[in-house]
Amino acid sequence: MMYHRPWILLLLAGCSWAHVSLAQTGGTGGGDTGGGTTGSGAAGGGTTGSGTSASPQGGTSTITPSTPTTGDTTGTGGTAPKKDPFGFSETTPGAAGGTSPFGTGGGATTTFGAGSRAGTTSIVPAGSSEATETTQPKVQPTTYSAPGFYGSGGQTFTSGQGRFTRPRFRYGASVGIGFDDNTLQTPTDSREIPEQTFSQTIPEQPEISTIVSQQQQTGVRFIGGAFRPVFQTVQRKVVLRPFQAQQVITQTIPGVPAQERNESVVSNVNAHLDIQWAKQRSLFTFDLNIGGDYYWNRTGDPLEYNGSMALVYLRKLTPRMQFTTSASLSYQAQPDYSQLNFNSALGSSGGSYFSGNAKVDLSYRWGSRFSTVSSISANAISYELETSKLNDYWGATLGQEFRYIWSPHYTWVGELRYGFSDYLNDQNRSYSEVFLLLGTDWTWSRRLRGTIRLGEQLRKFDSGGSGTAPYGEVTASYQSGARSQFVATTRYGFDQTARAGDQNVSFRGSLRYARAFSPRLSGDLSVNYVHNTITSELGTTDATAIYDASLSFDYKFSRRVSVNARYSYTLRSSTTGTSDYDRSRLFFTGQYEF
């Protein structure tokens, strides 16, 4: 894969040139990083004034420093800004499930019972202890916009709101108990294979022989003054194949009983840590979650381990330039269909797996309307089962995004991506690909916004052969009120396959609705849908659909103690029907924050 490295050097050289150009021009300009500015004043400065700018993701952010006063501080409109009771400001509307780099986050197939804490949106109901614990800031809240992972929307953070009302360091533990009605993902139409006996009769084989002539010595005579041997010719039988009697060979193949649906009570223990801080020019979030599930009635190994880590670091290097890095790592025993790099064609048969994703972005505003975002990302997945090792791979992607602010409602975007995936144990499946995309980031109102990317995906395999497919990414977010939000995201294009030579065109969609019913009670509904159309080298086609949904409710007794009830359902169907199954899980969890 040596031919990929010049792209990395080209990206680094471009970033360095942008930094030098900024130093030569003095790096002046008002407003936030990554968009055009109007009005006057320097964002992030210590003087009064105002500056409005467009974020790198096409949204707008306003930073209005004000003179410190005692008591409450009002904004430019004379009233203090209302805090989002959900903490949804952590994510750009349209982002798939908060800060989760893989899309939906909190999907029904994440860590069983506890959900995915690392990198998910926190719901902070209005009036809760977390929302009212901190004092009113003396300046307007600072808004940070960060590009998201490929295939998901961007992220927006606001100081003093959402998770930034928490202490800088927070840790806790949770215990739970639940029930799983299909722990082994047993096919719905599991049938018994009866014992089979095969007999083979080998007929009688006659003897095969031949007669050969040989010279045989019969004696010795005295001839010519010397003793000489005397020979005579004899006929001799030579057996080429002996006689074989008739034989009957019987072979018995043991039967396979129908796989029984395994049901089990499940116990769960988890520990978590989160860190967050936001300054005038930088921001940092970190989430760590480790735990395990114990299946009391499951055959085989009853213990499963799970863990996840997610972080985001953002730094405004200058008024024009912003650096962002995001990373997410996870180890899971159950399939998570909300992850964009999860091989849904392999499904639950892959066993426990490690998944990782990291991305670095450099945003630069060249003028009042034009900006660019240069990025590089890496991702990998590795399975524990030897039978799944052929699916281990790692890859990298370089991206260059060009952004033009057309109006307060639309930002036009052109994007070029180049990447590769290297299968460590099956080089025939390794490939490189190019994405040519056009789209827009749109904001129709303060409540409704989203992103659109449409174009072509070109894939070339290292072993020969290539293919093209339409590619699209669409995200949307609607916040109907101060207590609820709806998020949708979709993606269409090539996906991972389970065998060399196959082509898998997939559609992934996710919906999420969150609502705070009261300062103590909140709920969350999420739905994931994955449809794969796999075409083999021989031209045969197999379609698979996966439906994955979850519903959860969280109740806070106090700032430290809360309980959670969660139900999830997964259904898999295919044209062959050989591995179709459904699965339901119910879990109750108690959590304590230290």
Image (cartoon, rainbow, N blue to C red):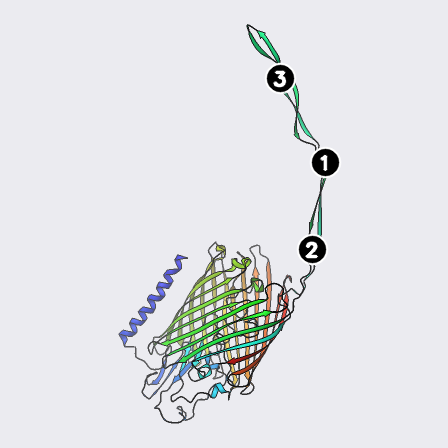
The kind of residue tagged 2 is Gly
Mark 2–mark 1 CB contact (< 8 Å)? no
The kind of residue tagged 1 is Ala
Q: Of marks 1 and 3, which one's residue comes earlier in the chain?
A: 3
What label sits on residue 384 in the rendered view?
A: none
Spatial CA span between label 2 and label 3: 63 Å
Q: Dot 2: what SS?
A: loop
Image position, residue 185 (x, y; %): 62, 66
Spatial CA span between label 2 and label 1: 32 Å
Q: Which residue is mark 3?
A: 216
In the depicted structure, whether residue 137 falls above or below residue 505 = below
Residue visible at 71% across and 54% down in the picture: 195
The kind of residue tagged 3 is Gln
Quadrant location of residue 159? bottom left
Spatial CA span between label 1 and label 3: 35 Å
Q: Of marks 2 and 1, which one's residue comes earlier in the chain?
A: 1
In the depicted structure, whether residue 119 falls above or below residue 203 = below
What label sits on residue 255 in the rendered view?
A: 2
- Is residue 107 in view? no
Q: Of marks 2 and 3, which one's residue comes earlier in the chain?
A: 3
Image position, residue 556 (x, y; %): 54, 84
- Is residue 68 in view? yes
Compared across the picture, whether 138 is left or right of 84 comes to left
The number of callouts visible is 3
Quadrant location of residue 551? bottom right
Q: Dot 3: what SS?
A: strand
Residue visible at 59% across and 57% down in the picture: 540
Quadrant location of residue 267? bottom right
Q: Which residue is mark 1?
A: 245
Image position, residue 445 (x, y; %): 48, 83
